């Protein structure tokens, strides 16, 4: 729960705007509230409005709009610098907070017109390092699927196999998978709808492996004593409730270990990377189509999957006509 009673009115108004107009998810709103609250706490210290240094004890309800109007771009830079040097925050963390601050001040200046000058108008996002995502090879993916379908050692093998199959074939997010309802699946058209980031709905097409895995799981899915709120859920836990994020993560971790794969290197999200990488490498998928499939807002996010394996680079060098001279 967001501690709205601890927030100044303009911050709560901004959160309401983010929910109703920007259609942000509850998790995003919670993160945004945390980001802005911490920023305002820093500003109270920076402006010498408090002697308290323990962030958990600093109150921001009395941080007025007049105080907000005192903030300059240099003050915001000071906060970002503090995160980098004192808190050792990663560039990705700082980028998220910069985004929250930018949207917050845009709301105050442009939407609500509560301040005349937007100090974050020219605030830049920290440069992010582009890293090649970790992913399973095609052989590792096949091995993972093979160990997951072992019904002798796992009474939920059909369910777990369907989960792994959807991850590896569709590249969906964890939150998207746990929230699938049976009615979301159109078996005749081999497709289903999922709700992604920002509550955006998109269509995911299902291949034969996915349809087969889902149908075989549905034959074993509990039909009685299902929690009322979970009756429409595709994947159920042992308690016959909608499966949780943590349970799915545990399933993936267990099956990765069974397949002899490094669980410190691979995880549920890495299966999404794997699906995207395999589709790009073996399916000749257009980058724009891959962007739509994965539900990326920006094409730059999808471009991390255009990396080329070292073996392909090696083969390219070996094929050089001058290689044998």
Image (cartoon, rainbow, N blue to C red):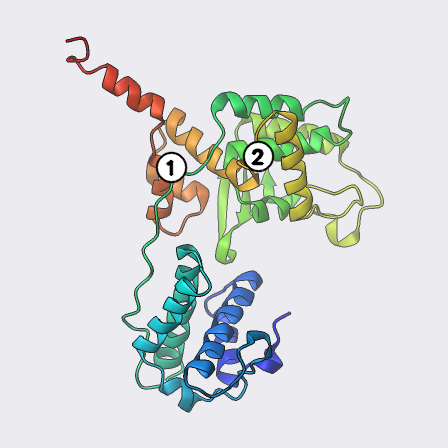
Of callouts 1 and 2, the N-terminal one: 2
158 relative to 48 in the view: left or right: right
**Who is closer to the viewer here, 9 or 53?**
53
Residue at position x 67%, y 37% from top? Answer: 251
Q: Residue furthest bottom?
A: 66
Residue 166's label in the rendered image is 2
Residue at position x 77%, y 21% from top? Answer: 152
Tell me the crowding category of disc 2: few under 14, some 14 to 19, or many 20 or more residues within 10 angstroms, Cα based.
many
Badge 2 marks a residue whose secondary structure is helix
| Percent coordinates x, y for residue 269 in the rendering | 53, 42
Image position of 198 with respect to 179: above or below: below
| Percent coordinates x, y for residue 268 in the rendering | 57, 40
Mark 1 or mark 2, whichever is nearer to me = 1
**Marks 1 and 2, how far apart at CA:** 19 Å
Residue 11's label in the rendered image is none
Is residue 62 something that shows in the picture? yes
Residue at position x 30%, y 83% from top? Answer: 117
Tell me the crowding category of disc 1: few under 14, some 14 to 19, or many 20 or more residues within 10 angstroms, Cα based.
many
Residue at position x 58%, y 49% from top? Answer: 175
The residue pinned by badge 1 equals: 305
14 relative to 178 in the view: left or right: left
| Quadrant (top left/top right/bottom left/bottom right) for the C terminus | top left
| Percent coordinates x, y for residue 223 in the rendering | 80, 39
| Percent coordinates x, y for residue 91 in the rendering | 39, 56
**Who is closer to the viewer here, 116 or 81?**
81
Instruction: Kindly indicate the quadrant of the structure image that contains residue 177.
Output: top right
Image position of 122 with respect to 157: above or below: below
């Amino acid at each position: 729960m967001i501690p709205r009673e601890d927030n100044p009115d303009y911050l709560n108004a901004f959160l309401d705007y983010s929910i109703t107009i920007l259609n942000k998810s509850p998790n995003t709103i919670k993160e945004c509230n945390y980001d802005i609250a911490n920023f305002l706490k820093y500003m109270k210290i920076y402006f010498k409005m408090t002697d308290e240094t323990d962030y958990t004890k600093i109150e921001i309800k009395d941080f007025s709009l007049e105080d907000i109007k005192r903030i300059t771009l240099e003050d915001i830079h000071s906060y970002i610098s503090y995160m980098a040097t004192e808190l050792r925050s990663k560039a990705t963390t700082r980028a998220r907070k910069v985004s929250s601050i930018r949207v917050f001040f845009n709301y105050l200046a442009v939407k609500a017109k509560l301040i005349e000058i937007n100090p974050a108008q020219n605030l830049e996002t920290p440069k992010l390092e582009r890293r090649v995502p970790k992913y399973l090879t095609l052989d590792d993916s096949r091995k993972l699927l093979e160990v997951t379908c072992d019904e002798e050692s796992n009474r939920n093998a059909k369910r777990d196999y369907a989960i792994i199959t959807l991850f590896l074939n569709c590249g969906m997010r964890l939150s998207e998978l746990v929230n699938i309802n049976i009615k979301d699946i159109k078996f005749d058209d081999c497709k289903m709808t999922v709700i992604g980031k920002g509550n955006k709905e998109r269509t995911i097409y299902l291949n034969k492996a996915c349809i087969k895995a889902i149908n075989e799981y549905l034959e074993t899915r509990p039909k009685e004593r299902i929690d009322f709120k979970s009756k429409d859920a595709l994947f159920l836990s042992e308690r016959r409730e909608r499966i949780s994020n943590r349970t799915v993560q545990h399933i993936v971790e267990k099956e990765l270990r069974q397949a002899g794969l490094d669980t410190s290197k691979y995880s549920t999200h890495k299966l999404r990377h794997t699906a995207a990488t395999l589709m790009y490498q073996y399916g000749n998928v257009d980058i724009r189509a891959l962007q739509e499939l994965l539900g990326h807002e920006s094409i730059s996010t999808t471009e991390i999957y255009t990396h080329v394996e070292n073996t392909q680079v090696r083969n390219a060098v070996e094929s050089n006509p001058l290689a044998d001279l």
